[in-house]
Image (cartoon, coloured by chain):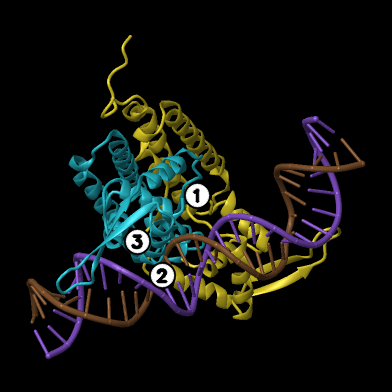
Chain colours: A cyan, B yellow, C purple, D brown
Amino acid sequence: MDVKTLCLGALDLGDATGYEIKKMFETGIFSHFHEASFGSIYPALTRLTDEGLLTCKSQQQGGRPDKKIYSITAEGRRALAQAIERPVSGDRFKSEFLFVMLFADMLSPENVTNLLENRIRDVRGELNELQAEQDSCVNPGQEFVRRYGEAVMRASLTFINENRHLVENPVRKNEVAPVR
Amino acid sequence: MDVKTLCLGALDLGDATGYEIKKMFETGIFSHFHEASFGSIYPALTRLTDEGLLTCKSQQQGGRPDKKIYSITAEGRRALAQAIERPVSGDRFKSEFLFVMLFADMLSPENVTNLLENRIRDVRGELNELQAEQDSCVNPGQEFVRRYGEAVMRASLTFINENRHLVENPVRKNEVAPVR
DNA sequence: GTGTGATATATCGAACCTATATATAGACAC
DNA sequence: GTGTCTATATATAGGTTCGATATATCACAC
């Protein structure tokens, strides 16, 4: 899904600045299942405005860059509706954690434990954020997506806690048990 | 994690052609948690070879392009070991399905059901692939990663089946129940 | 005072993806 | 027979996005 569509979606939820849209993808409602960078958001907003799918109002701010507030037009809403009716393509998922875990036997036990502990901390953080958003879901779709994220994060957490022994102190292939 | 490191990791598992490496990311062991395209794999292989981290043997093939078989060098192994010791960055996840589900109330009930059914089919497919790989995991790290994927896919499937009612026939915000 | 984080806009160069090209073969449908 | 798709292989151009950075100001901590 291209960034233009993502921005249309964000603005369907309400007027916003480019910075606020980025925030939505960074720590807000979209952050659990999509990404978009300043480098792609601003050019997309400009293009969408040129195409008549958005309008933009400049607001002066004391001591700060002027604020450009973007709004979706009726035409923009139609474009969004068309975009979400198209067949979706598959999830895109890249995890350095899982890639590195494939080579866990190349790491020291301390490294593996650190990896797992950091992972647990990250997943807990994500779960807490999702839970904190419980009262801000304004339609059933949002609630469904929030809970979906919760279910997946919970499963991750449970899995790691129950299976970390597989990689934390495995019998190394060519390793002899330490003599004590 | 850049594609150079991904290729080093792939070749640590055994010699391979560029095409075979792509296959590992498309349908093989890496496909559940990373991606890499031909457009990035081939330039990366060339760079790694120039840097002495890989060697390359050309093999003629009747009726086909010559096969270039890449092998990791000792230096390449060291570079891989260093790369996996670095702190990992967070998962990258983009889901058009979840983005669209946020706007489920803009879709017809048929569309929503199609979306969910397609999602269930996809997740089942992924789960089947992961299960089929059970006998090809050669170290505990690989088994951990495979099971992690299984756990997450199972949770997704369970969640959808138990919660689809939230979005399949929600009471629409501005909708009056049909008169029967 | 300096450094960091926040609110805002914007963009450049690097990295990667998509689509395509080339080549051959086999399977299948019309 | 022709066209399409899949498979095995290599390669790359143009498009998209990201990461880093720039600019500006303020608030806060040390």
Q: Quadrant of residue A3?
A: bottom left
Image location of residue B169, percent across then percent down: 34, 24
Q: Determine which residue is flagged by label 2.
A: B85
Which residue corresponds to the image point at 41% horizontal and 56% vertical from the top-left? A48
Give the number of the mark in front: 1 or 3: 1
Q: Which mark is residue B32?
A: 1
Amino acid carrying mark 1 in the image: His
Q: Quadrant of residue A66?
A: bottom left
- Drawn side of residue A38 relative to residue A137, left or right: right
Q: Chain of mark 1?
A: B
- For the question of whether residue A175 can be seen, the reply is yes
Image location of residue B29, percent across then percent down: 55, 52
Label 3 element class: helix
Rounded to the nearest whole Å, what is the CA distance between mark 2 and mark 3? 10 Å
Which residue corresponds to the image point at 46% horizontal and 59% vertical from the top-left? A99
Q: Is residue C30 above or below residue A94?
A: above
Mark 2 or mark 1, earlier in chain: 1
Q: Are marks 2 and 1 on the same chain?
A: yes
User: How many numbered marks are there?
Assistant: 3
Label 1 element class: loop
Comparing A21 with B130, the one in front is A21
Image location of residue B77, percent across then percent down: 54, 72
Q: Determine which residue is flagged by label 3.
A: A115
Q: Is residue B31 above or below residue A174?
A: above
